[in-house]
Image (cartoon, rainbow, N blue to C red):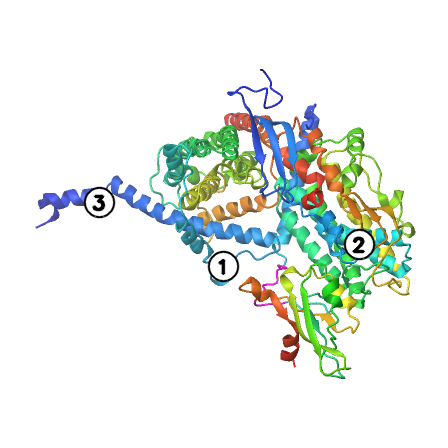
């Protein structure tokens, strides 16, 4: 009896090795890793903030506060999910879900190492950009349905900010893509095997970094959730688990943005001693540390200055960079 | 109508709306209610609503003797409590004609100036926090802790005729160490905040108070000195031991939020100079004059002005010859400073209202007493 | 509002000086990241209070009588602005000095002005160093000074 004589077994083995199965396993792994990631990042943020401000951060729960996020999650699960009476019920319910789903999908094309990638999609970079644009509408939904002037102001500001900063983001990415001629993330990393792109394109790297800080609504561009003005912006009316979904989405977006920067400019998994995945994680978390460091150093930019900065400073520089890259590639 | 200026001119589907920067808000300095009328993001009108912290201090003054009223001035403006205490004792001594020994005057000046530095830390750094920079606010509290430790070693409410406790050796050494330490810290604050391009862009030309507007509304303190008028009660109507010290009154011409912030930081340095001079020339002698146990001023009234961290404070005491004052009226600087907001805010953005409100440095319980 | 830069050189210099100030700011925060924290972690580390610290008042133990000198005159109770002191005493026999038996202070309303300490004719009160004052109910804030003096024997 060998394997080809049993028709059902052959089908089962074919199914197990197919793309569908690997995709599902990959998604399950993502669904397990993402909350762990967020838990770790929340703790790191609080510790970094504490030490910059000369205080220790959380210290009570677990040694040096390691279990703090776990207890926070338990607390948030236990809270009552209040729905105010005059909100738009369906949109209020859908907004947190729509803000979280693209964050999960964005992990699919990211190459953690030559072997570890859920699927090397042909248009990997565009996939991530497309899905992160979907979360913009969810912020507007959250702000509108809360029936609260503060939330509406925050949501409207956020939409304008996100739309404006996508343009320099895409232009900076294009400068890298015309060097590599491909959208596949795995091939972009392989093209950096000798020299990382940050040395070829420092200006594009700076623009990309600033634009992703603005896209993920982190300081100094965080007037969407400006604590001293709008209490809490568009997620003022959300309590309990819904609030934690917004939180999860913000930190996951930060990780995806840092991972994209690593892939595009910092050489992905290349590095001397350790295996590829360790280097990828080191580079990604270092970038996240820089974003947090910038948060606790700078004040907030006002809304009109933010738009001025995007349209009058970032976009001209990104366009000039693209032009120079095209000229150099044609000549060299 | 097109371009409505008030909410009554707007029809139901126009963009003018009212926002409550309500009594409970993360960045109002106390329980302060601002009714803001907005057109999109531009402010049309700001109306402060006060009275949420009224505790009746002036009414309490009519039912307590002069000594029993001593805790109250420190609670009116809790950030410059020792300055108010100094001023109240000065007002009663002026009414009764009590002479205060020189050593007590020097000690009062040292504690007042330390309190002024502590209050300016909160005032200036709270402005930075209103803009979004939370870190310097916490560094300011760390520096303030050193001042509060020093003041704890010497303090009590000052009594009429002098102070209660004398300076100890630890206070003297601690203050010297504190002065050196703080002078080294100013560079950090300067480079993190003053030179920062984001901070400059958000504070320059925002909330400009011209000289005429400031004088019309009766603004005093760093808010006035940021608009170019060099009026400080310590120089114009000198009191206590201030004539014996040399210090400058920092002024800036611009009148915007950045100027007021810079005035506060410069005033901290001048206060350090005053404390150093006072410690160098501290005279020996008694620390308290002989006063009767229950002070009984003669009939009459007197007005005594002094400079707190927020502006010129006045105590007007009316006495009818008994141990209980007939009326004590307090002129609080935050009350006059606050209403400048109604004049300068229209035309700015909502984010600027918070910044301007922070830069004027109002303590709400002082408004309501 | 801010005037926008009017020439191209102004635009470029603004960007360059701005970037330099941002980098300097990051350097300052990084330095502070690696300094020691200043927090005193309370239950495990405690600070010592200065001798002039003002906790609630307590009675001084004098050496000649091995106890306080309170004569229950009531001056402290009358001078207190918040009316928190209650004193009672009696005479051991006719012709002797009065002796204070009960002395209660409701600390939740005390404003720590020190007038009672100053006005006492026998100088029998002083400030204590107590700062760990936690109570379960409002009525527990009433402090009995005489029994506190007995317990500290």
Q: Nearer the viewer, mark 3 or mark 1?
A: 1
Tag 3 subunit: A
Where disc 3 sits, the SS reads helix
Image side of residue A25 versus residue C146, left or right? left
Closer to us: A51 or C15: A51
Question: Would residue B109 be seen by someone viewing this image from the given angle?
Answer: yes
Q: CA distance from mark 2 to mark 3?
A: 94 Å
Image side of residue B6 versus residue A284, left or right? right
Closer to us: A124 or B46: B46
Where disc 2 sits, the SS reads loop
Q: Which mark is residue A162?
A: none
What's drawn in magenta, residue-wise?
C37-46
Say if labels 2 and 3 share a chain: no
Marked residue nearer the N-terminal end (3 or 1): 3
Where disc 1 sits, the SS reads helix
Q: CA distance from mark 3 to mark 1?
A: 42 Å
Q: Which mark is residue A65?
A: 1
**Residue receiving disc 3:** A16
**For mark 2, does the 10 Å Cα neighbourhood hold few (<14), some (14 to 19), or many (20 or more) residues?**
many
Q: Nearer the viewer, mark 1 or mark 2?
A: 2
**Residue receiving disc 2:** B324
Q: Are marks 3 and 1 in contact (CB under 8 Å)?
A: no
Closer to us: B329 or B229: B329
Q: Position of residue B337 (x, y in %)?
A: 74, 37
Q: Nearer the viewer, mark 2 or mark 3?
A: 2
Q: Main secondary structure of the magenta part?
A: loop
Tag 1 subunit: A
Q: Position of residue A328 (x, y in %)?
A: 54, 28
Give the number of callouts.
Answer: 3
* Image quadrant where residue B213 sits: top right
Q: Position of residue B299 (x, y in %)?
A: 88, 50
């Amino acid at each position: 009896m060998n394997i080809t004589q049993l028709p059902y077994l052959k089908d089962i083995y074919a199914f197990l090795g197919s793309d569908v199965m690997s995709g599902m396993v990959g998604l399950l792994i993502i669904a397990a890793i993402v909350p762990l990631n967020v838990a770790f990042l929340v703790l790191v943020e609080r510790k970094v903030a504490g030490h910059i401000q000369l205080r220790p951060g959380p210290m009570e729960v677990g040694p040096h506060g390691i279990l703090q996020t776990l207890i926070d999650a338990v607390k948030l699960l236990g809270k009552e999910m209040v729905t105010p009476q005059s909100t738009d019920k369906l949109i209020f319910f859908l907004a947190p879900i729509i803000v979280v789903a693209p964050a999960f999908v964005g992990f699919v094309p990211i190459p953690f190492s030559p072997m570890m990638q859920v699927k090397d999609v042909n248009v990997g970079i565009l996939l991530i950009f497309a899905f992160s644009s979907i979360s913009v509408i969810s912020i507007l939904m959250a702000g509108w349905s809360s029936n609260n002037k503060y939330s509406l102001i925050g949501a409207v500001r956020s939409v304008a900010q996100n739309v404006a900063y996508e343009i320099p983001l895409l232009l900076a990415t294009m400068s890298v893509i015309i060097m590599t001629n491909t959208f596949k993330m795995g091939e972009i990393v392989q093209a950096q095997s000798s020299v990382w792109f940050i040395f070829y394109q420092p200006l594009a790297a700076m623009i990309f970094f600033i634009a992703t800080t603005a896209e993920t609504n982190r300081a100094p561009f965080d007037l969407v959730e400006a604590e001293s003005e709008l209490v809490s912006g568009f997620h003022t009316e959300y309590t309990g688990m819904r609030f934690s979904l917004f939180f999860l989405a913000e930190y996951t977006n930060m990780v995806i943005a840092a991972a994209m920067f690593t892939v595009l400019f910092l050489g992905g998994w290349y590095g001397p001693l350790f295996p590829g995945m360790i280097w990828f994680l080191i580079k990604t978390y270092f970038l996240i540390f820089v974003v947090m460091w910038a948060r606790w150093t700078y004040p907030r930019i006002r809304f009109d200055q933010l738009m001025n900065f995007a349209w009058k400073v970032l976009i001209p520089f990104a366009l000039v960079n693209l032009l120079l890259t095209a000229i150099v590639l044609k000549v060299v | 109508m097109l371009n409505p200026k008030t909410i009554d001119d707007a029809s139901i589907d126009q963009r003018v709306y009212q926002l409550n920067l309500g009594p409970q808000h993360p960045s109002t300095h106390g329980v302060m209610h601002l009714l803001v009328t907005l057109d999109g993001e531009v402010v049309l009108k700001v109306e402060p609503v006060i009275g949420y912290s009224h505790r009746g201090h002036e009414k309490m003054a009519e039912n307590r003797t002069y000594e029993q009223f001593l805790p109250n001035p420190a609670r009116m403006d809790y950030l410059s409590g020792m300055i108010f205490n100094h001023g109240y004792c000065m007002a009663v001594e002026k009414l009764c004609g009590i002479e205060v020994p020189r050593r007590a005057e020097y000690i009062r000046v040292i504690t007042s100036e330390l309190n002024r530095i502590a209050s300016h830390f909160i005032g200036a750094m709270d402005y930075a926090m209103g803009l979004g920079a939370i870190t310097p606010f916490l560094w300011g509290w760390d520096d303030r802790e050193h001042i509060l430790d020093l003041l704890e070693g010497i303090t009590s409410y000052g009594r009429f005729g002098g102070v209660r406790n004398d300076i100890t050796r630890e206070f003297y050494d601690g203050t010297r160490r504190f002065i050196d330490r703080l002078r080294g810290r100013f560079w950090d604050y300067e480079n993190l905040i003053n030179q920062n391009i984001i901070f400059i862009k958000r504070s320059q030309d925002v909330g400009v108070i011209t000289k005429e507007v400031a004088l019309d509304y009766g603004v005093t303190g760093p808010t006035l000195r940021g608009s170019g008028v060099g009026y400080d009660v310590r120089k114009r109507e000198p009191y206590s031991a201030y004539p014996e010290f040399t210090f400058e009154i920092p002024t800036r011409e611009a009148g915007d939020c950045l100027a007021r912030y810079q005035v506060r930081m410069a005033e901290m340095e001048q206060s350090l100079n005053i404390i150093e001079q006072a410690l160098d020339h501290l005279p020996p002698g008694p620390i308290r004059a002989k006063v009767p146990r229950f002070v009984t001023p003669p009939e009459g009234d007197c007005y005594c002005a002094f400079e707190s961290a927020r502006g010129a404070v006045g105590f007007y005491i009316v006495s009818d010859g008994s141990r209980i004052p007939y009326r004590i009226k307090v002129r609080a600087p935050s009350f006059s400073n606050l209403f400048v907001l109604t004049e300068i805010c229209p035309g700015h953005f909502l984010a600027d209202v918070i910044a301007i409100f922070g830069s004027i440095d109002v303590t709400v319980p002082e408004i309501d007493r | 509002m801010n005037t926008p830069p009017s020439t191209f050189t102004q635009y470029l210099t603004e960007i360059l000086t701005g970037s330099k100030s941002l980098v300097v700011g990051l350097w300052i925060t990084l330095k502070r990241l690696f300094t020691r924290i200043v927090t005193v972690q309370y239950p495990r580390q405690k600070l010592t209070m200065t001798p002039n610290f003002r906790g609630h008042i307590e009675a001084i133990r004098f050496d000649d009588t091995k106890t306080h000198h309170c004569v229950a005159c009531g001056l402290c109770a009358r001078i207190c602005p918040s009316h928190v002191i209650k004193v009672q005493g009696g005479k051991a026999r006719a012709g002797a000095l009065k002796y204070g038996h009960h002395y209660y202070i409701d600390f939740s309303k005390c404003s720590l002005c020190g007038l009672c300490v100053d006005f006492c004719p026998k100088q029998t009160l002083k400030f204590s160093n107590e700062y760990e004052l936690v109570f379960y109910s409002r009525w527990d804030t009433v402090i009995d000074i005489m029994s506190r003096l007995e317990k500290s024997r």
